[in-house]
Structure formats: C-alpha cells, structure tokens
Amino acid sequence: MASSHHHEFRLTRLAAALAVPVALGSYHHSAAAIELEEVIVTAQKRSESVMEIPSTVNVIDGEALKDFNVFSFTDLGALTAGLEIDSFNGRSGRINLRGIDYNPNSASEATVTTYWNQAIVDSNAVFQQMFDIQRIEVLRGPQGSLAGRTSPAGAINIYTARPNLDEMEGEIRATLADNDGVNTQAAGSFVLIPGELAVRVAGVYDESDLDEIENDLTGETTHDETSAGRVSLSWLPADSLSIDLAVQYLERDFDDVAVLEGAPAGDPSKQDPDGVLRELDAFDRRGAVVGLDNGIEDNTDAEFWNSSLVLEWELDSHTITSVTGYQDTDSTREYDQAIGNANPDNVARRIAVDDRTDWSQELRIASEGGETWDYMLGAYYENSDIHFSQQNFPIPLAPLPPGTSSVLLFPAEADRWGLFTHNQFYLTDAWTLQVGLRYQEIDADRDLSVVAGPDGAPGYEPGEVIVQVLSEDKQDYDDDSVTGQITLQYALSDESNLYALVATGWRPGGVTVTPTVVPEDLLLFDSEDSTSYELGFKSTLMEGALRLSGSLYYQDFEDYISRLNALSIRGESGQIEQSGLTVNGDAEVWGAEVDLTALLSENWHLAGTLSYAEGEFDNGTDLPCNEFDDDGAPVIPEGQSVALCDVGGDAIGSSPEFTASINSEYSIPFGRFEGYGRILYTYTGERDTETTGVDVDPYQTVNLYLGVREEQWNVELFATNLFDEEALRAGGGTEATPLVRQEPTGYGQRFPVAGRRVGVSASYRF
C-alpha cells in the first residue's frame, strides 16, 4: 500500500510541475508569435500533413531519437504511450499496441507489422540497432487496405536518412555509459552530381554489458556487441523520375543471462551437489545456470541484410511508384535450458537457428490534385522462405552416446499477393470520404518434424525422421481475405477536424511449432478477423503553437490468435506432457488515446501521449487450460486432449491498461551557445501476466538530459531511470521454471526494468 501511495504522489507531483509550464506557455505565446513545424508523413502512401490524416499516427523524427538516445528498437516504446516493444532473448521480439498482445513463440504473424523504407521487414531484423534515421511513423489500428500485410493492431514505418543532393553533410556521435557502454555513429552525405546524384554512408558500433545481469555460478555477465553499415543512393535522372536505394548489413553478438527469483528446491544431489545455489530476488539481477562448455549461458549470433529500392515516376496528374524489398536473416542462438541448475551433468543444450529470406514487390499508381476524387490502385507480391530448426541435447537420464540429439525442423515457404485501392472523395469543402479495399491470397507450404541429430539418436541414423508431427495433408495452407476501411472526415475549421472510421484486419492461420507429440487438431489454428470502430479529432491551437489529437476505439475479434504456455496435454500415447499452444478465441478491445505537442515559448517544448487500452475474451469462450487435483496432478477429462475453461472476461494478454509518455525541454541561450535540460517521464500501469497468473505492479521512470550545444556540436550528460526504480516489465516463464530431471528448480524467470544508467554523449555535425 505504501508503494502505491508513493507512485501516486510522484505522479501528482509531475502533473503539477507540468501544469506550470503550460500556464507559462500561454503567457509567453501571447508575447511572441511562435508555431510548430508542420509534420509531413506518408502513412497513406501520399505526402500529407499528419494533422490531415483521419487516423491515429504518431511521428518520431530523427532528432527526437537522438535527443533520447534511442539506439535500440526496443527503446522506441518509451516515446509513445500504448506501444510496448520487448526483446527478451535477443533473437525474437514482440510489439504490442492498443492492448493487442503478440507472443513471438506463437508462430503466427505479428499483430503490428514493420516496414523499412516502405518494404516489409521481419521483426528479427528491426529489433536491432537504430542509427541515422529520418523518422518513424506509428500507425494505430487495423491496416486493411494500404499496408503490404494486413494487421489488426497497426504498423511501424521506419525511414532511414536520405542523401542530400545539394551539399555535403554529416555527423559523428559518440556515447559512453557506466555499463561499459560505447556507441559510436557516423554518417556522411556526398554529392556526386549536384542536384541529381548523391550517396550517403552511415555506420554504427555499439558494445555494452546491457543491464549488467550476472550468472551467479559462472560470473558471466550480459554482453551485447553490434556493428552495422548502410549505403543509400538517391538519383534524379529526370525531373519526373526519382530512384532511392538503401542497403544495410548488421551483425550482432548477444550474450544473455536470465534473471531468476526464488530459492533452490528439489533434490540437491540432482541439481545442486556442491550446495552453491542460493535464494535470489529479481532485483539482485542474477541468474543461475551452469551453461555450456564455453562458459556462456545464452549466445546469439545474427546477421541481417536489408535492402529497399523505391522508384517514383511523376506524370502530369499521376504518380507511379515501385517498391522492391529484400531481406536475409541468419540467426543462431545457443543456450542451456536447465535454468536454476548447478549440476554440470544437467546441461540441456539447445541450438536454435533462424534462416529466412524475404522479397517483396509493390506497384501502385495514384492520382494527384483531383477536384472531387483522388484514387490509388496497386498490386503487391511477397515471397518468404523460412528454415527454423532447434537441436535439443537431452539431459542424460541414462547413458547415451556422445552427441546424441534430436532436431525440430520447421521449413516453410509462403507466397502472397494482393490487389488494393484507396480513394478520397472531396464531398464538400468540409466533408471528405475515404474508402479503401484490399483482396489478398496466401499460399504456404510447411512441414513440422523431429529428426535425429548429426550424430544420430538411439535407434535412429543421423537425419532419420523420429516423429512426423504435421501430416502430409496438412502441410499445404491456402487462404484469402477481403479487408478495407471507410473514413468520414469533417473539417470544423482550417485547424481542426473530426473523423469516424470503420476498418477491418486479418491474420492467416498456422501451426504451433513444438516437438511435443500432441493431437494434430490442437496444433492448427485458424485465421483471425477483426473490425475496429474509431472516433477521433485533430486540432492545431494557439495560432499553431499547440497540436492536440485524440481517439476512442472499439475492436471486435473473431478467432483472435493468442498463445497459451505450459499446458498439460494428453498425447497420442496417453501420457500427459507440457507444451505451449497457439489458439483461437473471440475477443474485444477498447480504449482511448491522446497526443499533445506544444511550444510553450520560444525555448520551451512539451510533448506527451496518454493511452488506455483494455482487452478481454468474450463470454462463453472456451480455451485450453490447466486443472489439477488435490495432489497437484493435472486433470484432463476423458475423451479430451486438454482441459477446457471458460475464459470470458479474462485479459487477452499482459498489456497494461494505462500508459503515459511525457517529455519536455527547456533551453537557455548565452552567447553563441545554448544550455538545455530535457526530461522524459513514462508510466506503465498494472498488468496481468498470463503465464504466471500473478499481477505486475505499476511503475514509472524518469530520464534526465543536461547539455550544451551550438550549431555544429553538442555535449550532454544523461541519466536513465534516474530514481533507480525497481519494477518488473513481466513475470516471465512459470512460477517454477521447467523441470530439471523431473524436479522443480524453485526459481522463476523475471524481466526487471533496467536500472539507473549514467553517461555522456557528444556529437559534431559538418
């Protein structure tokens, strides 16, 4: 209870502090005319002011990313409320938006799609270093007509900095932090033919000990090292034709340590023969695992190639655009599954490999400057070639030949194509109607099996099939969908408008990727449909010094795709095993959002977003669950493979209901220099954690930045999580981690908020 009052006091204190600059801003504004710069986006694949787009779009420009040291994609979530971005192991990440949850282990398509210079990009490729970015657009709500892939929650568009065709320019930036962190970035734009051809080269090197989490048994600490380079080319061979090419290579080496909480349990002779395990608290920031022969608990090595080629040909009244994208991902994660174990004989080695290539092609034509109607027509094609494998080395319950292992194989190839149109009808000077429609098909060929490892398995030769998990008649998947959006917009004035929209989203079905032998009907999940209703407003006030927008939304899901972990399942042999499943269930989501940006005076800036989102399963929705008898043994009714429970009213995920992100900067000029102070405040409300059944308490963090700058250079001191808030981002895992030799370890995995980090940053522009 005391902690709750503490949070409320700090929140109230911050609100009071912010009220003062708002009042001062009104006073200063009356003395001098100031206004915000117009923000131009391409959320609807046209260059438009963000205030004229009848949907919720958050824009974070490249300067803001530098201001708040957004080096990793996961840092982006702190800058806009309601957007959660997490990567718990360096190999896969999740993006939640508007309370719509996504678990990367579900093998389903993401609820929020990501694009890099207009081309679709896999989440693994974007969950990496951010450098030399022009802007990021966060589109909220179903993307059912214009996006390459339809998605229920939204899309994130990343635009890298383009070459300057007129003059040479560049920047060098270095940041040091007290976790042995070093981030060095450099970018330069060079003119080859003035006004016609230019190239931009950018690169980054980043190394740190992350949150300095230490393996209690080996002394190993988390460590991350990334290097990347990008070459961008802009060419104007004619006044009406532009060509933009960006090619990026990134490699990363990530060593992870899982934070544990709990005390050793079970038979010490099996898990702790030397008596070295101890009780751990989540904020000890310690793990406990023997690890592999190289002494590293988790080791992820990854390489990524991304490329985007955009051609625009302007005709008299139309623009033809071609977007070609290609990406190649090669990621290997090697780790020890026996968490909470101190016995070297219990190492459960795993090697997970992600190898995929994607290429996409979009072609569209759009009219320009119509008096009563503007339209866009387009076609889209995408090919994905995926090879996922996980080699499992079992804990030797009985003597096994050296190198014995099994390999879970999941190869898949998918082709999708779509036709879309988007239309804007200018009914009157005040009324605008937008109608979008998309038809798409997907054709996938996938397999799921377990084979003997390279050195074989008992009774099986290397590569021989041990279990054919997915039968041949289920290996082909074909589906299609029609989605779209209707929006009605009314301009109250040149500075304010209202809008109402109805939009639909869709995700294809798939198969749960698991080595556990379970009935096939449990492995398959169906496609998902959703319909969203949104009311919103956008306004520019105080003679251009204040932008304020907000929305209310409700979204109804049919066969919502979600992930359930650690379920007791009766296999075909009758034996009960544990596995995660991806399932369907009807659900609904509703909420509200507010976005504010203001120039309170010539040297005082304030911005913030507030979000409320709540999602739950519909009444009468039955989903797999765990039920136990008085002795703790799982109970599954006769004739069923899993127990079923009515989950009506239960949360669909672990997203908080309330979130806030508020930032403000005040600068003081003196001579040719300028001193400044900047603050970033974030609030994350209470949440349910599905996997543990426990609540995660609300928390808030404050980042502070103090610096001196002039036109070309900047020097800054910063502190993130200034008050060293101790809180959990998620519970993670189960209350007891997976059994080791059929014994619970007594530990649970936790994901704490990063502790206080202090550092210095300097940059020079030329």
Image (spheres, helix red, strand yellow):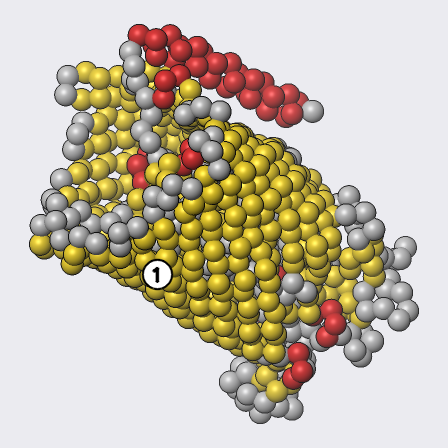
Q: Splitting the image into 4 quarters, where does residue 302 fall?
A: bottom left
Instruction: Give coordinates of residue 318: x percent, y percent.
Output: 32, 53
Q: Which residue shows up at 66% across the image and 78% down it?
A: 474
- Looking at the image, residue 725 sits to the left or right of residue 205; the answer is right
Q: Is residue 165 above or below residue 565?
A: above
Q: Splitting the image into 4 quarters, where does residue 728 fall?
A: top right
Instruction: Give coordinates of residue 657: x percent, y percent.
Output: 63, 36
Residue identifier under label 1: 323
**Amino acid at the residue labelled 1:** Val
Instruction: Give coordinates of residue 638: x percent, y percent.
Output: 90, 69
Q: How many marks?
A: 1
Q: Secondary structure at mark 1?
A: strand
Tell me the crowding category of disc 1: few under 14, some 14 to 19, or many 20 or more residues within 10 angstroms, Cα based: many
Q: Which residue shows up at 65% across the image and 44% down it?
A: 555
Instruction: Give coordinates of residue 177: x percent, y percent.
Output: 33, 39
Residue 650 showing in the rendered view: yes
746 or 276: nearer the viewer: 746
731 or 582: nearer the viewer: 582
